[in-house]
Image (cartoon, coloured by chain):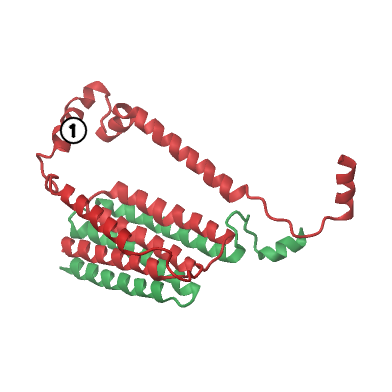
Chain colours: A red, B green
Amino acid sequence: MLDILDIALLFFMAVTAISILRLKNLFAVVMLGGIYSLLSALIFVNLDAVDVAFTEAAVGAGISTVLMLGTLALTSREEKQEKKPSHKIWLPLMVCIATGAALVYGTLDMPRYGDPNAPIHKHVAPRYINDSMDEVGMPNIVTSVLASYRGFDTLGETTVVFTAVVGVLILLTGRRRRDKREPTLEELEEQEEEV
Amino acid sequence: MMFAAAAAALIVAIFLGLIRAYLGPTIYDRILAGNMIGTMTVILIAVHGFLAGRPEFLDIALVYALINFIGTIAILKYFRFKDLGHAGTDKGREEVEDDA
């Protein structure tokens, strides 16, 4: 059943991507982008990566949609019709197929899904499980990994998230509105006095 | 079996929403389609928890509902004020600017 769910969701994602390519209404494209993120979040849940799914839904379906809408408010809502394609489609198509084939070939060497002998389960995980209580003294292993073993990594992530939040706040609130009305007489006099 | 049937029905509902988001024709069809697929995602995560025998992730579905709600509010605010940085009063933007 879960495999069927995966196949159905991947099919929907393909349908959404093709719809995004075909639509000229940019608002519909933004909405379909949010839907695409929700579908990929469902796939991550199906793969038991709940935290990744959570990030995908918050960033992809939440923040990205809002930022795209902010962009649409500043630009046009319709894509401009191109008179004739300025390039042939065959070269990009070949590049895509070749890259995709190389990536699929690369996955053939990967360990099977959930294989207990995979390198990720052999390398550092046993040390975390066995020694983290003595070395860090935290009952929750995930917390000790995030805050101690990968402390610098977490510090960098926090910096990135903080910078992103500040940037979004500036973009959303600090934008100057174009002033269309004529300046009043008092304002002109003030400007002259300043000069 | 019951949860499998529910998941199948949700998949069909998501597909119908996808068709509506593609065809439009109005903006509100698309907003509703996106909102509906978000709701279906919440329910599908809950159903998936029981289907996979791990209902611990039910809390996650609640937070998805919150994200969905905030997203819809942002989209509607964009249509009301054409600007997401607007403080958001009861009046439309034109009226606010006339008062200023």
Which one is in front, B66 or A64? A64
Q: Which residue is mark 1?
A: A125
Q: Which residue is found at the position 86% from the left and 55% from the top?
A: A184
| Mark 1 surroundings within 10 Å by alpha-carbon count, few (fewer than 14), some (14 through 19), many (20 or more) | few
* Residue at mark 1: chain: A
- Residue A157 position (above or below residue B16): above
Visible residue check, residue B22: yes
Q: Which residue is found at the position 39% from the left and 58% from the top?
A: B65
Which one is in front, A179 or A134? A179
Which kind of residue does numbered mark 1 sit on? Ala
Q: Is residue A97 left or right of residue A130?
A: right
Query: How many labels sit on residues?
Result: 1
Q: Which residue is found at the position 13% from the left and 33% from the top?
A: A122
Quarter of the image with the N terminus of chain B in it? bottom left
Snapshot quadrant of residue A73 = bottom right
Which one is in front, A105 or B13? A105
- Residue B36 position (above or below residue B74): below
State the residue lying farthest toward the top.
A135
Q: Position of residue A118 (x, y in %)?
A: 12, 40
Q: Position of residue B29 (x, y in %)?
A: 45, 74
- Residue A130 position (above or below residue A106): above
Which one is in front, A143 or A101? A101
Q: Position of residue B66 (x, y in %)?
A: 42, 56
Visible residue check, residue B36: no
Q: Which residue is found at the position 61% from the left and 63% from the top?
A: B81
Q: Is residue B92 left or right of residue B76?
A: right
